[in-house]
Amino acid sequence: MITSTRRVSPDKSEVRIAFSLEDTSDVKDVADIPQTFPDLEQRLQPVPPCVSLRESVQVHKEHCRMAREFHQVKHEIAAIEDCKRQLLAELVEDEKVAMEIARLEEEFLRLTEENRTLMTVHNECAQQLERLCLPNQTRQDSS
């Protein structure tokens, strides 16, 4: 383990840096992590770590993990937005169907009322015809 302590200026506190060249397991893992993430802006891309510093490798791994998580969340959001668009399209279609049903119900009520009126007029005409035909039948029978 190598440790270095420096004071940047007399009025600033000391900065201590420690690193080890012995354990390189983190460094091997870094090679397996993709170096670019197409969903991220260039300024947000993970910077390659300083492989001699464990903290740098850990920060890089965390940054890459967050980039993968961002990618996953971005795709989930896109899927949810697609679902939202589909649901809105279905809602518009359902509203059209509901308006057509309401129009057909109104037409049914209007036609039902018209049918009742026509049936009443038909019955009245039939009764009137019967009354008019009865005196003619009695005259024909008496002759």
Image (cartoon, helix red, strand yellow):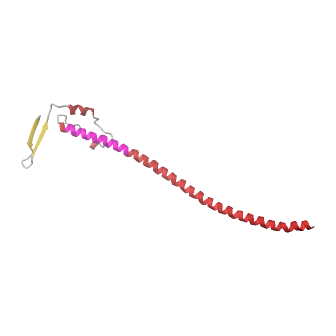
Q: Nearer the viewer, residue 109 or 65?
A: 109
Query: Residue at coordinates 57% horizontally, 56% vertically from top-left?
Result: 101
Q: Could you tell whether 8 is left or right of 35 in the image?
A: left
Q: Tell me which corner region of the image, top left, top right, bottom left or bottom right, holds residue 40.
A: top left
The x and y percentages for residue 15 are 11, 43
Q: Nearer the viewer, residue 110 or 45?
A: 110
Q: How many marks?
A: 0
Q: Is residue 129 magenta?
A: no
Query: Residue at coordinates 40% horizontally, 44% vertically from top-left?
Result: 79
Q: Could you tell whether 72 is left or right of 135 in the image?
A: left
Q: Where, quadrant-wise, is the N terminus in this rendering?
A: top left
Query: Residue at coordinates 31% horizontally, 43% vertically from top-left?
Result: 70
Q: Could you tell whether 120 is left or right of 143 in the image?
A: left
The x and y percentages for residue 37 are 31, 39
Q: Is residue 65 magenta?
A: yes
Q: Nearer the viewer, residue 29 or 136?
A: 136
The answer to whether 109 is drawn above or below residue 38 in the figure is below
Furthest residue in direction right, as rendered: 143
Q: Nearer the viewer, residue 33 or 97?
A: 97
Query: Residue at coordinates 53% horizontally, 54% vertically from top-left?
Result: 96
The answer to whether 14 is drawn above or below residue 33 in the figure is below
Give the overall secondary structure of the magenta segment.
Answer: helix
The x and y percentages for residue 134 are 84, 67
The x and y percentages for residue 143 are 93, 67
Q: Tell me which corner region of the image, top left, top right, bottom left or bottom right, holds residue 75.
A: top left
What segment is highlighted magenta in the picture?
A: 56-76
